Structure formats: C-alpha cells, structure tokens
Amino acid sequence: MNTVKLAWRNLLRNRRRTLATLGTMVAGVVALLLFGGYNRTVQYGLQTSFVRGMGHLQIQHRDFFLYGSGNPAAYGIRDYQRVMRVVQNDPVLKPMLTVATPTLSLGGIAGHYAAGASRTVFAQGSEVDGQNRMRQWDDYHFGAPGKPAALTGSAPDAAVIGKGLARVLQLCDALKMGHCAPPPPTVAAGAAMPTDLAALSASSPQPKADGSIELLAATASGAPNVARLQVVKAQSMGVKELDDMFVSLHLAQAQRLVYGSDEPRVTAIALQLQHTYQIPAARARLAQLFNTSLKDQPLAVYDFSELQPQYGQITGMFGTIFGFLSILIGCVSLFTIANTMNMVVMERTVEIGTLRAMGLRRGGIQRLFLCEGVMLGGLGSVCGIALSLLLAALINHAGLTWLPPGQVDPAPIYVRLWGENGMMLATALGLMLMAMLSAWWPARRAARAVIVDALRHA
C-alpha cells in the first residue's frame, strides 16, 4: 500500500508530463476501440446480410457445389420434403432452427420476343414465405428487419429480374425504369428483304411489347422447355455481373420448367439457425443424419462463409487493418511511456539514492516504478474506454451511412462498442501490459543505481 501511495503521489508531482502521457494513451485507446467497434459492425452486418439471404447452412447434393451449377437437374435433391421433415423434427436440430426453405438454381436463356432481345441468365426459384421469414433474422439487434421479397403477393408466373437484364431485354418502358436509354438501331448488312416477304411480315400480327419474358431451360431429360413469365419488378443486385443475368421466380414454376411432370427436386435446402455460433453443432448433427436417416441420398452441408467467400475476404481485410493499427498504437504507447519513465528516473536520482540509503532494496525501487507505469496504463485505459463509449454513442446517433460491398441499400455507420466487454477488457489489459513493459527498463536502471553516485546529484 505504501508503494501504491508513493507511486500515485509521484504521478501527481509533475501533472503536465503525466497528462501529456495520458493524452497519448487515451488517443490510442479511443482510436483502437472505435475502429474495433466499427470492425465488429462490418462483420456482423455482412453476416446478417448473408444469413438473411441464404441461411447459415445449405444442404446440397454432394457434388452440386463443384459440378452442379451447369446441370441442376442431375444434381438435385430428390424427395426433398422428407429431408426437410427429418431435419426439422430432429430433437437436436429443432431447438436451433428458425427457418428451413428449399431453393432451385438453374441456368437458361431469357428472351423478350416483342423486342427480339435475349441473353443467358441465372435463375433461382424459391418459396416466398420462407424467404420472408429468413429476412427477419436479427441476432445482433441492428433493429432494421429485411425488406420483404419482391415476389411477395405475386402470381405464380411472376418473376423479378435485375435492372441490367431489363435493359438488355428492352423492358425499361414496361417496367417504368428511369435512366434507361434505348439501344442504338442496328443496320442490316445483307440484301434487302423481297417486297412480297416484307408485305407478309407487315400483315402478320405483331407481338405486344409488354412486361413478359420467355425463359428457356433444359429439362431433366435434356429437352428444352419454355416458361412465359410476367416480370413484376426490376431490382438492382449490387454486382453488375449478377444484375445483368439474374431472374427470380417461384419455386413451383422453376420446378415445372426443369422437371416438367417428373418428381420435383431442389438444388439446396437453406437452414437458418437461432445463433451463428451454433453452426459447428448443427453441422455435426447433420453429418450424423447423413449417415443414418438420410443415408439413401448423397448429401453434403456448407455454411454461408463457404458459399460466399467474399465474407471471409472482407472481414479478413478489416481484421488485418485492425491488427496493424493495434501494433502501431502499442508501439507509440510503449515508447511514450518509456520516455516518460526515463525522464522520471533522471529527475529523481537523488530521491532514489535517499530511499536506497534508508534501506529500501532494489526490488522495492523497481516495484515503485513498475507500479507507476501500471497506474498510468490503468488510468489511460479507463479514460480511453469512457471517451470511446461517449464518441461511439455520438456516431451511432449521427445518422451516417455507407454502402457495403455487394449491397444495394445503404447501411448505417454504427460503432458496436457497448456490450463488447471482451474487446474493451483486452484493450485495457494490453495497454497496462505495454505500460509495464515500457517502465521495466527504467525501473531496472533506477534499482541498479549506486547509492553514493545517486546522492552526489544533490
């Protein structure tokens, strides 16, 4: 207790130097915690977006992930409703699950016959009710539920396409899209059409330019099949490649297009859990089911980070920046406190000699200076955390937004600091450790001082 009191009194002796050191430490803690809180927000926000769109886990045919994107008919899950019942009624998985919904992905050619335009597309059939329930997931309490699916309340033959695809198929007027200039007219390079054929073409009934498209896809038997779809909306997908080729339709319509009158299948069953940390337990249980109740089918399970590699890439980039910033702030704090303690030792040489002459051993001198360093670190941590919480609250209520990668709706700039006790505790302990390490060498030099030489500075 005497050491603590003496260390505290020594810090108050030179308030200007102590405040300057504390200011450096507080600025470092604030920068570290604010960026750390923003890093958590980015991580949780991206995770929420992916989980709302595709769930935590997806059950697929064992080879669909590698080979099935070009041939969904050959790699579909047969009797998928029984698979869903087994998963939903399992006593281990049932408490974890919030939603289990099937999807069917396929490729094809979309055409707008009235405009004579077509292009290859990627289509996905889904159950609207299941998609809407998945969009309500908010485990990290952002307070902003997802928008309902664009197909909500639409007819069975309805479809939603990307805005880029709508421009290619010349559906801008039918869908009332703005900023959509018509393509330049093409000039035929061949000979002119004979007059009799031109007259016959002019007299034939012309197709009506409406909002419908034809979707051509290969069936399970290999023969082509066509579905006429009524486009109800064109929406931006956030990625141009996807925006130029995406078609969303009802699951039943997609199944009729691919399988016709045969047994309908799906390419994936999306599973959404209560919490993300339940993924390992759910995967382990699903592996057991694949070897027992569902062993008659070649099934595999993938989590959202495997299906969307950009999640790990984006969070890894922010994690690297956060780690670099932590090292930089740690080095600044280390040298600042070391310089302060070196100056303290030089100014208190006589005091050190007097204490040694009074019988205080070298270990006591070293503990005194180490205690001062730890107290500086602790005080800087407390002030830094308090100021960080205040600034985080101000930022969270400022209404600032940013556009995450691959998203179409702006997300609020939010610093998630309140409740992140582990990060704040790690920051405080790290700063105190840095302060102790930076005070160790000056404390060691002060403890090894010779009594006569120290008293000679009086």
Image (cartoon, rainbow, N blue to C red):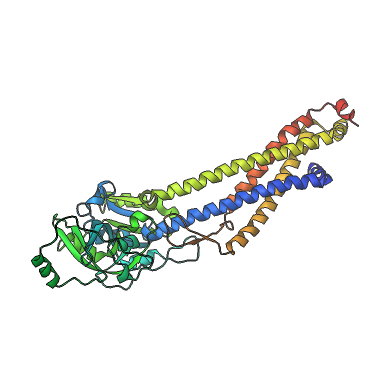
Image spot of residue 225 (x, y percent): 16, 61
Image spot of residue 290 (x, y percent): 28, 50
**Residue drawn at point x = 27 percent, y = 57 percent:** 121
* 396 sits left or right of 407 in the view: right
* 74 sits left or right of 414 in the view: left
> Which of these two is toward me, 82 or 322?
322
Would you say residue 302 is visible in this rendering? yes
Quadrant assignment for the C terminus = top right
**Residue drawn at point x = 65 percent, y = 49 percent:** 29
Residue found at the very far right of the displayed protein: 458
- Image height of 300 relative to 166, above or below: above
Image spot of residue 388 (x, y percent): 64, 55
- The number of discs equals 0
- Image height of 421 relative to 437, above or below: below
Quadrant assignment for the N terminus = top right
> Which of these two is toward me, 452 or 73?
73
Image spot of residue 279 (x, y percent): 40, 52
Quarter of image, res 433: top right
Quarter of image, res 205: bottom left
Would you say residue 275 is visible in this rendering? no
* 361 sits left or right of 272 in the view: right
